[in-house]
Image: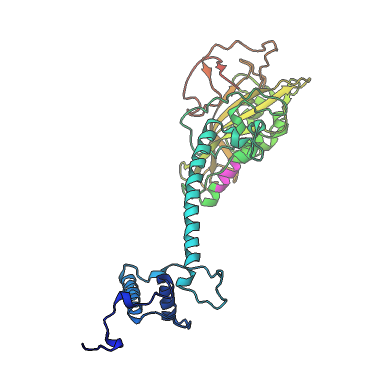
Amino acid sequence: MSTVPPDERPDDASDRPSPSISDDELESFLREAAEGGGAPAPEEPSARARMVTARLRAQEEAARRAPGGGGRGKWPRRKRRTAGASAGTPEGWRTGPAWQEMNGTRTRRRRAGAVIGVALAVALAAVAVRPSLVTDRLPGGGPEAAASPTPLPAETALPSGAPGQVAGAGGPTRERPFRGSPALRWADGAEAIELPAAKAVAGMSKADVELALRRTKEFLVAANLDPAVIAGGRPEKALALLDPEAPDLLPDLRRALREPTREHDPVGLFSRFAPDDVRLAGDVVKVRGHMSFAAGDPGEIEVHADYTFVYPLVRSGGGDHVERTIVRRDITTLLLDPDRWIATRGKLAIKTYNVETYNNACEVYDGYLHPVFPEARATGAPATGPAADPYDRSQAVGATEHEGCGTVTRT
């Protein structure tokens, strides 16, 4: 019988000693060695070591060949110290547990996001049914929020229809004179009269157009928003803006103010109330409308203005009852080039004007507007015309012709 030297005997499992470390520990050692670690090699049979090394190399090669390869280096890792690791432990596969923890954090975030999404959907459904759940908790929210709702954007053209009813708001009071009215969302006074962007027309410069627009606004403010005029005074500031060269314009207006008649009534251009009867409740008039301009004849700028004014009023003798009178004015002014026309530079002429008044006594032509209070004895003729909504600005003034004095659907 021949004798085989011990180092040439076949590798037989029965003859191998038990491994001194586990497979995981051996893989850990080999990976650390490949990345420059200097830990001493554990005792292990060379054949098994070669097998594990070959498997690790095959895994690394497959990772590099994969789309977007880079393997472990593709993901950022947190620098953190794990239990038993020294401060000088390099980043790499030994930080795997921290990476797993980071992935776990991402998973928890995704799950939390799903839960939040469901909760948000439930919350939105609840708010849709009961908006007060949110509005009551906002600054200025709650039942009193209706006192100052979101203002409407500026009007640039006639709307498509009348504004809706203000449900459950109640009527006007001294403290809240526009409660229950669509005018609550309108702008206040002169700020509501916004001028369009100017450009040169009809041989007139951009500056001329800007002047025409500005003068028209000044006239509207002086004629309809001046507290002295509202209280029954003469509209001197408004008259001063008009061209004395315009035939009959100023003489007719002065005569109307001095001796008002049906044919010459100053309320056609000026909002005036009899001071012995009523006075403004507060100091705010709500305004809604728009302004535009166009070229007239050469050297002539036409400015068209269409505005509704809402006046809250109380009796001069006292009392808390508030009534609102609404006045809609449609006016076209002219600014003329004095080099081409007989005109005064910077002054306005009036081409046309129309007015519609609501909650105003019928057939009274004394130069003042007269709001109707429910407890008062009628001072004018009874209303016989059709009903009208004073807040409906969808039709041009005078679009519907009718005789007599109609009734209003709301104030």
Q: Tell me the residue at 64%/18% (across/down).
A: 365
Instruction: Tell me where residue 284 sits by quadrant.
Output: top right
Q: Main secondary structure of the magenta part?
A: helix
Please state, as top left, top right, bottom left or bottom right, where the C terminus lies in the image: top right
Say left or right for 274 vs 61. Answer: right
Q: Tell me the residue at 63%/41% (across/down).
A: 191
Q: Is residue 97 above or below residue 410?
A: below
Instruction: Tell me where residue 408 sits by quadrant.
Output: top right
Q: How is the image coloured?
A: rainbow
Q: Position of residue 258 (x, y in %)?
A: 69, 25
Q: Nearer the viewer, residue 310 or 96?
A: 96
Q: Is residue 333 above or below residue 177?
A: below
Q: Is residue 25 above or below residue 220?
A: below
Q: Nearer the viewer, residue 62 or 110?
A: 62
| Residue extent of the magenta highlight | 210-216
Please state, as top left, top right, bottom left or bottom right, where the N terminus lies in the image: bottom left
Q: Nearer the viewer, residue 357 or 185?
A: 185
Q: Position of residue 354 (x, y in %)?
A: 54, 27
Say left or right for 294 vs 344. Answer: left
Please indicate, yes or no, whether residue 16 appears anywhere in the rendered image.
yes
Say left or right for 267 vs 233. Answer: left
Instruction: Tell me where residue 234 sits by quadrant.
Output: top right
Q: Tell me the residue at 55%/78% (across/down).
A: 88
